[in-house]
């Protein structure tokens, strides 16, 4: 409503400028008005996708941000109308969802398990509106909620295997932000991968910071100093490859690794050679969790073919998770060759990519 | 908060507290003398700018008192000034305004119409999100924003009342956050672990929440009374302890849902939830009524009871209160216990009212916002009620501000911060709006 008024205002404004032919900003504004026109044309889809963050906000350099990027991309490429609401506290979840329902959203995507209850409640109260939730699944499927989760251990397994092969000291390290399933699943896969390497190649690589049920956690997703200290601790104990699973805290780990030299970092969530280019020279690989693509696909599907409440599970097979390219000459060739076999094994279900199995 | 800034080495009084309370006059006189010899130091360095210094009250206390004594008009103008400055920020944050300003000199009209649009959109979104929604089709939708404001105000009101009592007794309690969390933990645990019939279960959970907060408030009060440990430092540290304690508890099975490892507690039983005040269409629950009752109690306590008189006297001048035969140590402990209980009730408004679950994010920033609420309400119960409703309104407007006006929610936080800034500097507001300087109303405030 407000948006359409505003688009109208911009259109009127650009018309005014066009009428006043020859003024300096004309080019700029006429370009703008054409983009407006195309968006408006695309908006004939008449679909509004909305998103509610958890208390971390959309600038958390972690899953809220990835999800938001997917939403923005959907707005640009599919021409759907988008709206977002950032939560600053837990008590914002319900009201944010209500406000988006009231604003006429067709699909509302919530981010994180903390919104699980609020989403279920909003879905029950508004059977006509569809919902999707990132990183959370319900015991009982709900008719108008699509859960989206990711088997990140599959990708972390490959990263752990590769890291074990690349390590000079035979010691790896990993730590998390908080011990919650979406974090520990990375660490679990990483450990399982290193163990698999030991089994296959007869190595004796050890992993610091995770023993399969407990390990090193910094306690939050904000404090980079803690990431730096934890990583320094690992390096002092002989580790030369570290995987921080703690959002922006990982940047602290990167700076510790960089100043130590002769050590590597495994990024998580996105490809860190792109998201943290200042550390590109120390990134061994990144464990990719393509929340952004999953959100985009979900919106695409809901706006096009129609919404289903079938869970989205990101796996190696559908490339919802994966690992980034290695820098040249760091990971031995027999290891990279073996990774392909492992990938196929995981996809076929022959290899269990966690320590539990 | 003041007298502990001057260290009391040895502190006979604290050591023999029981004896001191019996023979107050002698002990207090000795103590007063001991402190007297130290006061020149802060006065000498503190500078004569603060008028309260001439009264002999230590400097840090005078700042707090200046804030508390600012007139209602100054408070109102501070809110107005904050909203105006926020308007400027809204213009900067708005894309259309930025775009139009790019060619300001060829088409100044565009910029102004874009500014008008942005401001109109923002202020109307705040109004529609916090007061009434005049676009709604039915009465429920029309009045819902205001009930949402009251719901959001409930925990702020509880915590603000407790803090206000502390401020008037001269204790700068920063620990509402931790007290709230511990209260919420205990309240939630009673709520989901026990299964009892309705009124008893709720009552037990509410009492549990108050008790949890009271225990967490007792610690700094006791340490201050016995050892002179500064309550600001102790309460801040206890906030951390509370947060990590809750984070730890939520990793235990007893606090998690069956079959899940996520750090989120089970939903509290319906029998332990505050019943909804206006039916299913609104989130407003009986916790708000309880908070209003709490405001009345705080008023009665501070204005009508002997204990309240003592607390105010301690806040005005603890040395004088001691000399007059009041037990200052007891007052400190009692104030912190009461403030903690109120903060615990704020936690109950979260876990038994709106959220119904316990997580590490249950406290949000309520404990800190409540400090602002108490200062804005000048530590008086009635003022705190209005301040809590104002802040509840700003919080309730967050969703509409984002979804309707497309503005970042941070604007709301900036408005809150600006209000605090202006409240803390009454002379700034007076010069901005050319208000007359007040005649000093110190005696009235004490």
Image (cartoon, rainbow, N blue to C red):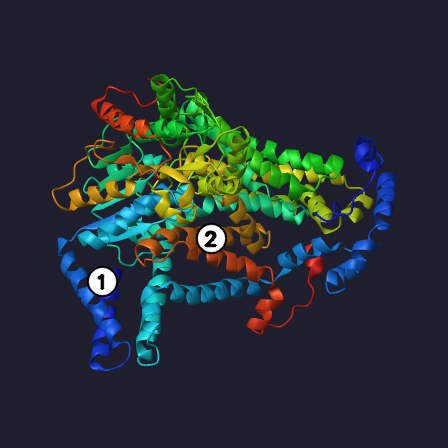
Secondary structure at badge 2 equals: helix
- Residue depth check, mark 2 versus mark 1: number of the one nearer the observer: 1
Q: Which mark is residue B391?
A: 2
Marks 2/1: CA distance? 30 Å
Instruction: Describe residue A339's horizontal placement relative to residue A87 as left or right.
Output: left
Residue at the far left: name it: A305
Could you tell me if residue B200 is visible in this image?
Answer: no
The answer to whether the residues at label 2 and label 1 have Cβ atoms under 8 Å apart is no
- The verdict on a common chain for dots 2 and 1 is no
Residue B198 % position (x, y) = 40, 27
Question: What residue is pinned by disc 1?
Answer: A4
Chain name for mark 2: B
* Occupied quadrant, residue B356: top left
Instruction: Describe residue B243's horizontal placement relative to residue B150 as left or right.
Output: right
- Callout 2 crowding tier (Cα within 10 Å): few <14, some 14–19, many ≥20: many
- Callout 1 crowding tier (Cα within 10 Å): few <14, some 14–19, many ≥20: few
Could you tell me if residue A55 is visible in this image?
Answer: yes
Pick the front one: A66 or A332: A332
Residue B102 % position (x, y) = 34, 73
Instruction: Describe residue A47's horizontal placement relative to residue B56 as left or right.
Output: left
- Classify B91 as above or below A102: below
- Classify B194 as above or below A270: above
């Amino acid at each position: 409503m407000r948006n359409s008024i505003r688009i109208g205002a911009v259109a009127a404004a650009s018309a005014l400028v066009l009428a006043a032919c020859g003024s300096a900003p004309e080019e700029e504004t006429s370009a703008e008005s054409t983009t407006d026109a195309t968006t408006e044309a695309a908006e004939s889809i008449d679909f509004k996708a909305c998103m509610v963050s958890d208390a971390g906000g959309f600038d958390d350099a972690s899953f809220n941000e990835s999800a938001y990027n997917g939403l923005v991309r959907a707005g640009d490429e599919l021409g759907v109308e988008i709206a977002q609401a950032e939560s600053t506290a837990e008590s914002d979840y319900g009201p944010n969802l209500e406000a988006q329902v009231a604003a006429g959203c067709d699909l509302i995507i919530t981010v994180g398990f903390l919104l699980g209850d609020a989403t279920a409640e909003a879905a029950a109260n508004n059977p006509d509106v569809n919902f999707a939730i990132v990183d959370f699944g319900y015991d009982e499927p709900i008719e108008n909620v699509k859960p989206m989760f990711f088997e990140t251990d599959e990708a972390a397994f490959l990263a752990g295997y590769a890291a074990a092969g690349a390590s000079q000291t035979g010691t790896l390290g990993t730590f998390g932000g908080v011990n919650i399933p979406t974090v520990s699943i990375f660490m679990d896969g990483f450990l399982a991968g290193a163990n698999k390497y030991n089994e296959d190649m007869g190595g004796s690589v050890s992993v610091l910071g995770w023993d399969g049920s407990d390990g090193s956690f910094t306690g939050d997703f904000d404090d980079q100093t803690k990431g730096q200290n934890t990583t320094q601790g690992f390096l002092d104990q002989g580790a030369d490859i570290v995987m921080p699973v703690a959002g922006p805290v990982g940047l602290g780990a990167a700076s510790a690794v960089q100043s130590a030299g002769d050590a590597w970092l495994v990024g998580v969530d996105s490809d860190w050679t792109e998201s943290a280019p200042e550390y590109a020279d120390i990134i061994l690989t990144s464990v990719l969790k393509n929340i952004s693509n999953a959100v985009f696909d979900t919106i695409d599907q809901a706006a096009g073919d129609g919404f289903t409440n079938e869970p989205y599970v990101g796996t190696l097979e559908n490339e919802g998770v994966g690992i980034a390219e290695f820098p040249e000459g760091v990971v031995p060739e027999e290891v990279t060759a073996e990774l392909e076999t492992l990938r196929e094994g995981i996809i076929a279900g022959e290899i269990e990519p966690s320590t539990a199995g | 908060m003041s007298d502990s800034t001057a260290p009391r080495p040895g502190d006979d009084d604290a050591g023999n507290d029981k004896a001191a309370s019996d023979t107050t006059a002698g002990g207090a006189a000795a103590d007063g003398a001991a402190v007297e010899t130290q006061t020149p130091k802060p006065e000498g360095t503190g500078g004569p700018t603060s008028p309260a210094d001439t009264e002999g009250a230590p400097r840090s206390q005078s700042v707090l008192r200046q804030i508390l004594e600012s007139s209602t008009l100054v408070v109102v103008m501070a809110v107005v000034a904050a909203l105006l400055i926020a308007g400027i920020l809204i213009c900067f944050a708005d894309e259309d305004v930025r775009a139009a300003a790019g060619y300001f000199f060829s088409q100044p009209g565009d910029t102004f119409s874009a500014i008008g649009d942005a401001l109109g959109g923002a202020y109307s979104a705040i109004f529609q999100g916090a007061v009434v929604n005049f676009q709604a089709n039915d009465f429920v939708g029309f009045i819902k924003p205001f009930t949402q404001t009251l719901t959001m105000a409930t925990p702020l009101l509880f915590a603000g009342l407790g803090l206000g009592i502390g401020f008037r007794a001269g204790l700068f309690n920063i620990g509402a956050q931790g007290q709230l969390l511990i209260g919420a933990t205990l309240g939630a645990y009673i709520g989901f672990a026990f299964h009892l019939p309705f009124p008893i279960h709720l009552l037990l959970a509410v009492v549990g929440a108050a008790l949890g907060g009271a225990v967490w408030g007792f610690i700094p009060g006791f340490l201050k009374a016995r050892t002179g440990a500064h309550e600001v430092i102790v309460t801040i540290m206890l906030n951390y302890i509370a947060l990590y304690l809750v984070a730890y508890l939520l990793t235990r099975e007893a606090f998690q849902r069956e079959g899940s490892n996520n750090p989120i507690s089970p939903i509290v039983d319906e029998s332990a939830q505050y019943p909804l005040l206006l039916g299913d269409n609104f989130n407003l629950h009986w916790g708000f009524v309880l908070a209003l009752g709490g405001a009345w109690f705080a008023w009665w306590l501070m204005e009508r009871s002997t204990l309240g008189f003592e607390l105010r006297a301690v806040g005005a001048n603890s040395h004088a209160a001691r000399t007059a035969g009041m037990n200052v140590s007891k007052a400190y402990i009692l104030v912190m216990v009461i403030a903690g209980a109120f903060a615990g009730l704020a936690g109950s408004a979260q876990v038994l009212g709106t959220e119904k679950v316990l997580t590490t994010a249950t406290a949000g920033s309520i404990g800190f916002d409540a400090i602002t609420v108490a200062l804005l309400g000048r530590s008086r119960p009635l003022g705190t009620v209005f301040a809590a409703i104002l802040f509840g309104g700003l919080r309730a407007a967050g969703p509409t501000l984002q979804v309707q006006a497309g503005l970042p929610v941070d604007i709301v936080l900036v408005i809150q911060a600006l209000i605090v800034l202006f409240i803390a500097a009454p002379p700034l507001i007076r010069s901005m709006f050319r208000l007359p300087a007040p005649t000093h109303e110190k005696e009235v405030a004490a």
